[in-house]
Image: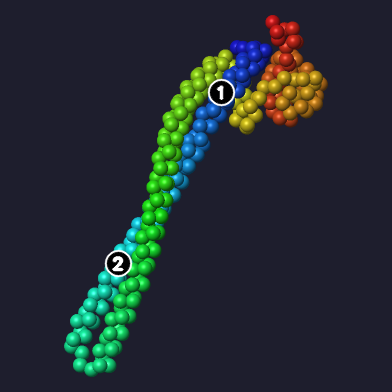
């Protein structure tokens, strides 16, 4: 059975390893948001590209329907032109002529719209092309970024595994009932579960400890815990002894 003094020394060694492990875990966790940021940038750029493509398609569809519209107006004008020969009265002839003129004018108006649409389509295609070039660049950057981040993650995971192994090894000499107390304190978000008594104060929460508590810590008979913050207390070695 380990003495309290040995157990406290083992806990302090464990706490050092736990702090290293905490840092290694943070390093691992820090990679995922960076990967997400790269992927989100890429996804946004693809969305812009898709939107530009959709716009061109929309304009082309509109142009197609306008062309059909022109064709049907011209066809109507042509059919009415054929009917001119069959008309009996002058009034009917003039009415038909007016109708044909109206149809041709309407077809001409739509053709003007088509010319405008063709300019719009050219502009949209140019925009698409520029975005495609930009996307290609961003894809290349993202690819190398993601490769670098994957390597970083793998390295960080290796270091975390090593820190975990070192931590587990350091936990072995700590008596199980003391380890439970220590782990419980750490699980409550207190990274420094074992703290020194400094000038009669708790090294964790700084509260002034009762003299009986300071004495209990010094006696090394049982595990002393701060009444205020529940951290495990220990009496630091004299500087000379610590250096030795
Ligand atoms: Zn305290």
Q: Which residue lies furthest to the right in this view?
A: 211
Quarter of the image for residue 61 reads: bottom left
Q: Which residue is drawn at 50% across and 21% down?
A: 159
Q: Is residue 46 shown left or right of residue 65?
A: right
Query: Of residues 166 and 10, which is closer to you in this image?
Result: 166
Quarter of the image for residue 146 reads: top left
The residue where tag 1 is placed is 21
Q: Residue 67 carries which label?
A: 2
Quarter of the image for residue 22 reads: top right
Q: Can residue 146 be seen in this view?
A: no
Query: Of residues 173 and 91, which is closer to you in this image?
Result: 91
**Total residue callouts:** 2
In the rendered image, residue 3, in percent from the top left (x then y), is placed at: 65, 12
- Disc 1 on helix, strand or loop? helix
Q: Which mark is residue 231?
A: none
Disc 1 under 8 Å from ligand 1? The reply is no
In the rendered image, residue 243, in percent from the top left (x then y), is placed at: 70, 8
């Amino acid at each position: 059975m380990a003495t309290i003094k040995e157990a406290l020394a083992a806990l302090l060694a464990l706490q050092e390893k736990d702090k290293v492990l905490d840092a290694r875990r943070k390093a691992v966790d820090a990679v995922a948001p960076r990967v997400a940021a790269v992927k989100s940038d890429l996804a946004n750029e693809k969305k812009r590209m898709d939107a530009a493509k959709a716009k061109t398609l929309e304009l082309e569809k509109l142009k197609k329907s306008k062309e059909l519209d022109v064709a049907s107006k011209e066809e109507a004008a042509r059919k009415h032109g054929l009917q001119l020969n069959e008309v009996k009265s002058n009034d009917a002839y003039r009415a038909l002529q007016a109708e044909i003129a109206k149809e041709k004018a309407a077809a001409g108006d739509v053709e003007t719209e088509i010319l405008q649409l063709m300019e719009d389509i050219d502009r949209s295609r140019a925009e698409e092309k520029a975005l495609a070039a930009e996307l290609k660049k961003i894809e290349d950057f993202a690819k190398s970024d993601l490769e670098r981040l994957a390597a970083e993650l793998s390295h960080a995971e290796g270091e975390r595994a090593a820190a975990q192994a070192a931590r587990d090894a350091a936990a072995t000499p700590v008596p199980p009932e003391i380890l439970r107390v220590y782990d419980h304190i750490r699980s409550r978000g207190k990274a420094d579960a074992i703290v020194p008594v400094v000038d009669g104060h708790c090294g964790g929460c700084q509260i002034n400890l009762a003299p009986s508590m300071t004495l209990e810590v010094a006696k090394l008979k049982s595990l002393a815990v701060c009444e205020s913050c529940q951290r495990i207390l220990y009496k630091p070695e004299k500087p000379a002894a610590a250096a030795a």
